Amino acid sequence: MLKLDDLLCFGVYSTNHAMNKVYSPLLKNIGLTYTQYLVMIALWEKDRQLVGEIGEKLFLATNTLTPLLKRLEKNGLIERIRSKEDERQVTVHLTKKGKHLESEAICIPEKILEATGMKESEIEVICSQFIQLRQNLLGHLK
Amino acid sequence: MLKLDDLLCFGVYSTNHAMNKVYSPLLKNIGLTYTQYLVMIALWEKDRQLVGEIGEKLFLATNTLTPLLKRLEKNGLIERIRSKEDERQVTVHLTKKGKHLESEAICIPEKILEATGMKESEIEVICSQFIQLRQNLLGHLK
DNA sequence: CGCGATCTTATCGCATGCGATATATTATGT
DNA sequence: ACATAATATATCGCATGCGATAAGATCGCG
């Protein structure tokens, strides 16, 4: 018989939800949704990226990203500029406001760490297990 | 500096996505979405549950569940019946078609196990760590 | 050169999730 | 008994995710 609590997928699913619930109030303070936060982190790491580059890092396609990026643009955090060399491509870059937001976001990870109730060393182990599992799953799809 | 790959949350988020990608074709065969699958598992475990009971197990509120349950009802897998003793409550129970669907779903977990590329013993350890993390996060919210 | 294949982004429809609010019913305190 | 609070479900609006498809630009091959 199928049991909910025995399913790895439900462990991942429900943990993801819990993570979102913890992030939600923190991100609300800086006016971002969770996915928008991930996009901003990608851009803080490296400014001026193509839509496709961002998608590759976040495992998201343009059907999710294009509307999301338009909302970030409307909020004045990024700009989307279609490339002149190759007009298929759209480069995303941070505005001054978008760059400045990083200083407000920088305190979030420690609050999350606290909420996990785990030591940093434990987190590292669990995180690498997640990544391993993710790679196995994605590898199996090919 | 914030780095995407160091964030536990992104590990959970992206693994959840990968899990969904693996499940998607399997669930399409039996005509369920992933969340619908979770609801059905809850009902296969125990038929006749209140909307609220299902929500508690899946960590979902009625704003998600009510429309989802209506779709399952429209597809003939469940019935929703408002209780006569307490007319605030709605009991969800499986139809014959809904019960029968379990036999088609029963083969899914082994396919998922294969896709994880891990041994069952490993899965158990990882899964319990996820659940521990989830409990910590949820406990921190109170 | 020309034209079909490929690439890059955008659009559409549907199903979650969830904060906020509404509605109806039951419980409670005086 | 009756006003009020608490409970259970439903509705609404918005932001993802994603399969399918479209639109436009570039590439590649004959």
Image: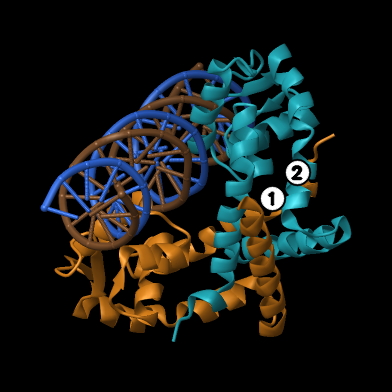
Chain colours: A orange, B cyan, C blue, D brown
x, y percent for residue B5: 54, 75
Badge number at residue A9: 1
Secondary structure of the residue carrying numbered label 1: helix
Residue at image location 61% in from the left, 57% down from the top:
A138
- The residue that mark 2 highlights is B111
Instruction: Please identify the quarter of the rendering in which residue A17 is found.
Output: bottom right
Chain for numbered disc 1 = A
x, y percent for residue B78: 64, 19
Distance (Cα) linking label 2 and label 1: 12 Å
Q: Could you classify mark 2 by the number of other residues whose Cα lies within 10 Å: few (under 14), some (14-19), or many (20 or more)?
A: few
Please name the amino acid that badge 2 sits on: Lys
x, y percent for residue B25: 60, 38
Left or right: A99, with A135 as reference point: left
Q: Nearer the viewer, mark 2 or mark 1?
A: 2
Residue at image location 79% in from the left, 25% down from the top:
B103
Residue at image location 69% in from the left, 82% down from the top:
A119
Asked if the residue at tag 1 contacts the one at tag 2, i.e. Cβ–Cβ closer than 8 Å, the answer is no
Up-down: is A113 above or below A24?
A: below
